Each structure stands twice: as structure tokens, then as C-alpha cells.
Image: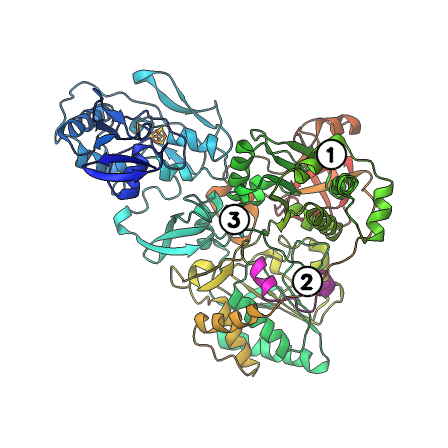
Amino acid sequence: MIKIKIDGKVLEVKPKTSIIEVADKVGIDIPRFCYHKKLSVAANCRMCLVEVKNFAKPLPACATQVMEGMEISTKSKFTKDTQKSVMEFLLINHPLDCPICDQGGECDLQDTAVAYGANKSRYTEEKRVVFDKNIGPLISTDLTRCIQCTRCVRFLKEVGGMAELGLIGRGEHAEISAYVDKSVESELSGNIIDLCPVGALTSKPFRYSARSWELSRRSTISCHDSLGSNMEAHVKDDIVKRVIPKENESINECWISDRDRFSYEGLYHKDRINLPLKRVKNQWEEIDWEEAYELIEKNITDINTKKSDQIGIVCSPQSTLEEGFLLKKIAKELNTSHIDYHLLEKSFSKNNNWLGCKIDEIESHDAILVVGSNLKHDQPLLAHRFRRYANKKNNFSIITSYDDFHSTHCLEKIIVNPSAYLNYLLMILKEIQLITKYKINSQGIKNTLKVLKSSNETKKIAQSLLSTKSKAIFLGHQILHLEDGDNIKFVAMHIAQATEATLGLLPGDANSVGLNELNLNSNNISTDKILSQKKEAYIMMNFDPLYDYHSPKKINDALKNAKFNLAISPYISDSFKEFDVVLPMTPFTETSGTFMNMEKRIQSFSAVTPPFGQARPGWKILRVLANFLQFEGFLYDSSEDVKADAMIELDKKNEYILIDFKPSKITKGLETLNLIKANDSDMIVRRASSLHKNKKNQNCCLINPSTMLKKGLIDGQKIMISSSEAEVLINVKADENVCSNVIAIFGKQDETFSLGMHNKVKIKKA
Ligand code: SF4
Ligand code: FES
């Protein structure tokens, strides 16, 4: 520690800390524009200049490290005069358009000018004008207002992972620019709106819809992935007008992904239903809640009195702990053991499905291996931690089918088809076994290892896992789509045991970890099984049966065959045509509840607006349904009461079932890889219009040029893809990032959802 003096106060501080960091820690205000604690230091705005004893010139507090005996004055006349001059320079070219600027009321430049600037301008010359650029449907530019702090440039490069904006020109001609004709495509792009200290970058969907002082700020939790980002919803007239991050260093730091930020548009989509619907001769008819409950009660009771297990219950892994708990209780009363929430999982074993460590511990590992994840889309914000880790420590390896880690430094990057993931993990295990003599008790693995040869890449990964102290293996989303998923988990577990690594899953949905811990699927029966056993009735909650399930054909067949189907959903669409009744539930912004995130952190949230129309929160719908079915023990007054009972259930120990390795073959021929874009992940984001205005890669599949050459295909050509689920006519697009022999299709999109998740496919030219 060293001793310094700041504004006469003696402090003991760590060496190599900057003056601005010290000042922030002790609550001394130093104005700044370009400095941001999460970005590299640019020191180009000069707003933070302070007087330091024995230095003739003022020094930038953001770029000056403290030294023993340093005496800093942040309030002296010299400092104040300096800051006033800098402010004057910064305002020379800034337009006086504050009354019509969307940043009004929350503008750093305005606030700083009032606090540190002069009270009138001496500048009478003409101001410069910078033409605005169209950088996409999410961010509006007014670049004349830009003060060239470069926060946006640094964010996209350092956090977003790709340098999508740059500063061109010099001096008075300097301006922010994207690549020619390119919009900003980062899944985290909206954060530059918050970062911009002036009104040069504002939110396009929010623009001119409200002034910042008219908005009520209400805390909430993201429902779009299992990170559990903390957010603030800004509400006017009971409508969510915008969403911004709420800082939580150990979860989302100070960022959120674009789907968290802009999905609120989907809350007000025309598909929202505000009254229960009953299907009459293939038409939807609105009915009141009383009639809907009576109809459900009659049908469910009729079916249920015959024999047990005639009703299948499937809910989304986005369901809150309260909803999951009530569904489980209802299933028990209905005498059905057929309840589940696994929608994408093709292979099924009851697993410990969490991250395996705290989110903020990820970067403390000495070596990391990620298998089967398109991190950029599966985990848009978490991907930043992996990128930061990889660029800092040279020990990050990934096995995947689509290479979206271009600017990230990887120790090994193995791009293979999904059905080969298992083999590559086995090769790593073989190498580890050779070195450590690790004993494997599975005959299946032993037999497979005998005939397998490791590659140079797998040897390198094995060595990196063995030669380091703390290491972690993370299995991604793509593993869920594979028949081989359980085998992969089994082999990864052996690698983790042999190397003393942490094994974690990167769960995709807001509460898949919570529902697992709740033991919702206590009978270990998968949704696949529930559907193939053709139940007499199905209750499905909070997901689109066709887009969100890995086999649209299977779920459609089961629903068609059933006598009565009930959906509880915020939206209605063609996907629901096999249902008899749809009850309108509120999305996460209109209900209270609890999610357990990927690191098993429990976070509760409250409604930020009242329900839309007569829609009701999921937990209330289930509570009243149970009352109509005359089940006892459902007299809950609030979601907090339900949570209290759910927490008791959480305390019970879960038993995980480890399924032994069953040798399987690598798929010969072509197979699909389902790339689920971040903005297609659930019913709400799919309906957020601005997130889908950039129609890039719509209605096409991606194929490696080498595979195209082999199959005689050309870019832009139409082909027919046939899987066991469906046939789809689609354009071909060459993409070197896809591994060969793979047809990458966009999961959960209109054109391709019917093909299902990961299948063997045939193609023919159309
Ligand atoms: S656009 Fe905003 S964030 Fe980007 S350089 Fe200009 S002022 Fe800074
Ligand atoms: S904040 Fe220090 S130079 Fe900009």
C-alpha cells in the first residue's frame, strides 16, 4: 500500500490504481466522459484533468496511476479552470438541441456542463455537422452530438467481441463510423446507448415515446436466459417503455443483451390474448374465466376418473418456481406421474444441470473447455466472460460446429459436426487415461477407447486440463439436441473426474435449474415419453408447442390424438390449433415469481405493470384451476406464500440418475445443426419487432463451401431439405464457419422449425 493525499485527505491505496479509481472509491467526484470502469482507458476527452502537486500541467485522472506521496487537488482553482476550458472545447461543436434530444434529463454532457462548465458560450463561429448513419433497427444516431469519447468503439471491440464501429478522420473531422453499408450486429449492441454520454446514440424503438422524467423505474429479472440479468423496466401509463441494465457485478456486471433490452416490444404484440379462448369448429371463441374453468374441470375430471397417468403436463423451463411447484402439486392430485419441462432435450437423464461454479468464478480457472455451444447466441452476455477469459489467459478451448469465435484467442478450436462431439471427448479422455492411468469402470467406454486414436488437438486439450490447477468443462446448448447427449455428459464427467475439473452445463432457460432442483420431473419421465404414450389430455404451459419443442411432428401428433388439450399461454397463434382451451397468462413483467439462475442463485421479482386485459399470472391460474378441481391445499393468497412452500421442496435432496455409456455411431452423410439465434429463443423475443427488422440470414441454410462443392451446389440456389420430421424448401448460403457435412439451419424460425432439432437429412436441388 502507498500513501497519497487527495483534497487534503490522507489515504492508503493500492499501487497501480488510477486517480479516478481512488476518487470513485472514496466518493470524490471527478467529471469524465471517455472513462468507463469496464473499458480500456482512452484518455481522449480530457474532462478528468486534475491538479497534481509538482506537475506543471494538469494530469488525466483516468490515465494517471497514484504514486507514493502524490498530492491531488480535484477542487482547486487550477483544476476547476482546466475543467471549464475542456468543457468549453467539448461544447464548441455540440449542437444546442437539448429540448428535442432523447437524452434530455439523463445526459452526462448536460449535467457536467452545468456543474463544471461556464454559464455562457464565447463561440460564435459555425458548428460542424456530421451526417447520421443507419447502424441498424435498434440504435439511432445523431452524430453531430458526438464528442468522440470512443466508449461505443471500445465497447463493441472489447465486450461485444467485434470491432463494428471505429473513429475515422482527425481533429475536427473525426467521426464515428461503421463499416460501409454495415449495421451493428452484436447481440450486446444496445449497451452503447447507455454508454454514450451524450445523445449521439439513442434507442430507436424508444425514441420520442417518453421523457426520462416521466418514467417509473421498476426492478425485474430477465426471463430470456439462465444468467438472470438484473434489469430496470421503465414504465409510463402502465406500459413498459424501455429496459436498461441494473448493475450486479457478479451476474450481468453493468450490461444486458439486446434480447433483454428490446424484448419488451413483444409484450404488446397483437397475438396477446386477454380473455380465455375456447375452440369451436376450428375457430377461437372468447369466453369468461368462469366458463373456461368449468369446461376444463369437466373434461379433466372425466378423463382422470378412468385411470391414472392419462394426463400429460409439460411446462416451459421459463416457468417460475411458483408455477412449477403448483403444477407439480396439481400433477400429484391428478394422479399423474407424467410431468416434465425438458423441451429441447433429445436424450434425457436426470442431471445436475447447473453451471458448476459461480458466474464470477468462470474467469478464475486456469483452463476452460467448452463443448457444443454457439456461445454468441446461446449465452450472449455470458459469452463476454468467456471471450475476456480467452483473450487474457491462453487456455481456452472449444469444440463446436459453428465458428463464431473469430477475434478470440483459443488454445484449440475444433470445428466438427455435432455427432462427432462425443468422439472428440473420448479422444481427450483416452489421452488423459494414458497419462494418468485413470480407471474407467464403464465397459462401453473401455471398448470404444481401444479403437480410438487421439489427434494433436485433443492431446493439447488433455494436456491443458492436466497441467493446470483449476479447470472447468462446460457443455453447451447443442448437446441437448443430440441423441448422444447423455453419452457426452457421461464422458465429460469422466474427463472432469480424471482431471479434477469442474463440470458444468450452460443451461439455456431462465429457470431450468430451478425446476430441476424443485424435482419437477421426480419420476424421470421425459416429455418425449409423455408424448409418445399418447395421453388422453395434455396441459401445456408457457411455450409454443411447435417452435419450442425439438420435434414439432411428435408433439403435434400427440395433441391431435388427445381428447382434451389445455394451453396456458400469453399468446395465440397457429401453433395452438390442436388445443381446446387457451387461458391467457401474463408474461414475466406482469407477474411476480422466482427464478433460480445457472449458478443456483434464487432471484424473486415483482410485476412491473398490471396484467394486460383479463390475463392472469400463471400461479393464480393454477391456484384457481386447483380450486375448481376441488383439490385441497391450494388456498394461497400471494406468490410469496407459494414460494414459501416451494422453498421447502427445494431443500429436499435431488437424486441424479447417471445413465451408462452406450456406444453409438457417427452420423454418415448430412446432419443438421440448429443455430438458435438469441432473438428467437422464446415466445416474447420472437415477437419483439425491432429485434427482427434486420432480415439477415432469413429463409436460408448455411453450408460450408467445401460441402457445397461436393454436392454441386451454388450460393443462392434453392434446395429441398428432408428430415424425418418434414421437408423444407430453402436457399443455400455459403458460410465457411459451418463445419463440413453439416446443414446449419436457424432453429425456431418460421421457415425451418418444422425440421426439428438435429436430424439426419437429405438434400436435393429444387
Ligand atoms: S457516439 Fe457517443 S459513445 Fe460513441 S464516441 Fe460519440 S459520444 Fe462517445
Ligand atoms: S475521462 Fe479521463 S480523459 Fe476522458
Look at mark 1 in the image and give the residue it sits on: 459
Identified by mark 2, the residue type is Tyr
Pinpoint residue 655: horizontal percent, then vertical percent: 67, 65
Q: The residue tagged with tag 3: helix, strand or loop?
A: helix
Asked if one can make out residue 558 in the rendered structure from this viewpoint, the answer is: yes
Give the mark nearer the N terminus: 3 vs 2. 3
Pinpoint residue 741: horizontal percent, then vertical percent: 76, 34
> If the image is split into quadrants, where does the C terminus sit?
top right
Pinpoint residue 346: horizontal percent, then vertical percent: 72, 54
Identified by mark 3, the residue type is Ile
On residue 359, the disc is 3
The quarter holding residue 166 reads top left
Query: Label 3 to label 2, Cα distance in Å?
Result: 23 Å
Is disc 3 surrounded by few (<14), some (14 to 19) or many (20+) residues within 10 Å?
Answer: many
| 367 and 557: which is toward the camera | 367
Of circles 1 and 2, the one toward us is 1
Look at mark 2 in the image and give the residue it sits on: 656
User: What's drawn in magenta, residue-wise?
Assistant: 513-531
Asked if one can make out residue 541 in the rendered structure from this viewpoint, the answer is: no
Identified by mark 1, the residue type is Lys
> Which residue sits at x=64%, y=33%?
403
Query: Label 1 to label 3, Cα distance in Å?
Result: 28 Å
Asked if residue 248 lies in the magenta stretch, the reply is no
On residue 267, the disc is none
Instruction: Please tell me whether residue 296 is drawn above or below residue 677 in the rendered image.
Output: below
Asked if residue 515 lies in the magenta stretch, the reply is yes
Is disc 1 surrounded by few (<14), some (14 to 19) or many (20+) residues within 10 Å?
Answer: some
Is disc 2 surrounded by few (<14), some (14 to 19) or many (20+) residues within 10 Å?
Answer: some
Residues under numbered marks 3 and 2 in contact, where contact means CB atoms less than 8 Å apart: no
The quarter holding residue 115 reads top left
